[in-house]
Image (tube, rainbow, N blue to C red):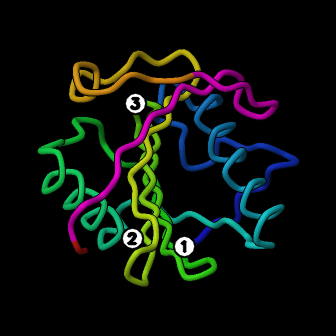
Amino acid sequence: MQQVVDFQDVSAAGLESSPFAAALAGLRANEARYYRNKYDHTFTVSPAGEAAEIVDWVHRILEEERDIVIAASPLEATSFEVEGTRMAYVFYESGLSVNVMYGLADGMKRAVGFKLAEGMEVPEELASRFKFARQKSKLAGTIRGTFFVIKGEY
């Protein structure tokens, strides 16, 4: 069942099993606000079990591009298209958010982004491979993030 992410009344619904539920909810709300303001898109999420195709697609890209396997359990996922770009998000119990930006036309940008909920440590599978930059968010506190460019076709 899809749930609309409200960025004005932030809720941790669906993320309760995470030790960083409140911070992860803020991170999710931050994304919802961005897509509402930039694209007038309503950001919705589904439980990971109901969105297995999305989770599998994101995991396939991570594994094939960089041999990355996320150890944490996925809690929620979403996928949608804005301005010719397929976006996919997976939110994990550890407080990690992984997003794929995949331009559908040749030559468009394609990348994977990682964001860490405030308070969580960098996951072991990412720690030695990436440096994380910090940004402030009213909804999510301090977000640490990084990305890599996708080279393959998915």
Tell me which segment is drawn in magenta: 134-152
Up the image or down, 77 lies above or below 141; here it is: below
Q: Main secondary structure of the magenta part?
A: strand
Question: Of discs 3 and 2, which sits in the foreground?
Answer: 3
- Picture coordinates of residue 130 (x, y %)? 32, 26
- Picture coordinates of residue 80 (x, y %)? 54, 75
Measured in 3D between alpha carbons, the distance from the residue under mark 1 to the one under mark 2, in whole angstroms, is: 8 Å
- Picture coordinates of residue 122 (x, y %)? 37, 20
* Sequence-first disc among 3 and 2: 2
Cβ atoms under marks 1 and 2 closer than 8 Å: yes
Amino acid under label 1?
Answer: Met
Residue pictured at 30% horizontal, 68% vertical: 52
Residue under numbered circle 1: 1
Measured in 3D between alpha carbons, the distance from the residue under mark 3 to the one under mark 2, in whole angstroms, is: 19 Å
Image quarter in which the N terminus is found: bottom right
Image quarter in which the C terminus is found: bottom left
| Secondary-structure class at tag 1 | loop
In the picture, the disc for residue 94 is: 3
Amino acid under label 3?
Answer: Ser
- Picture coordinates of residue 147 (x, y %)? 41, 41
Cβ atoms under marks 3 and 2 closer than 8 Å: no
Magenta stretch: residue 151 in it? yes
Q: How many marks?
A: 3
Up the image or down, 31 lies above or below 107; here it is: above
Q: Residues within 10 Å of mark 1 (few under 14, many from 20)?
A: few
Residue pictured at 18% horizontal, 42% vertical: 68
Amino acid under label 2?
Answer: Glu
Residue under numbered circle 2: 50
Asked whether, in this view, residue 61 is left or right of residue 21, the answer is left
Q: Residues within 10 Å of mark 2 (few under 14, many from 20)?
A: some
Q: Residues within 10 Å of mark 3 (few under 14, many from 20)?
A: many
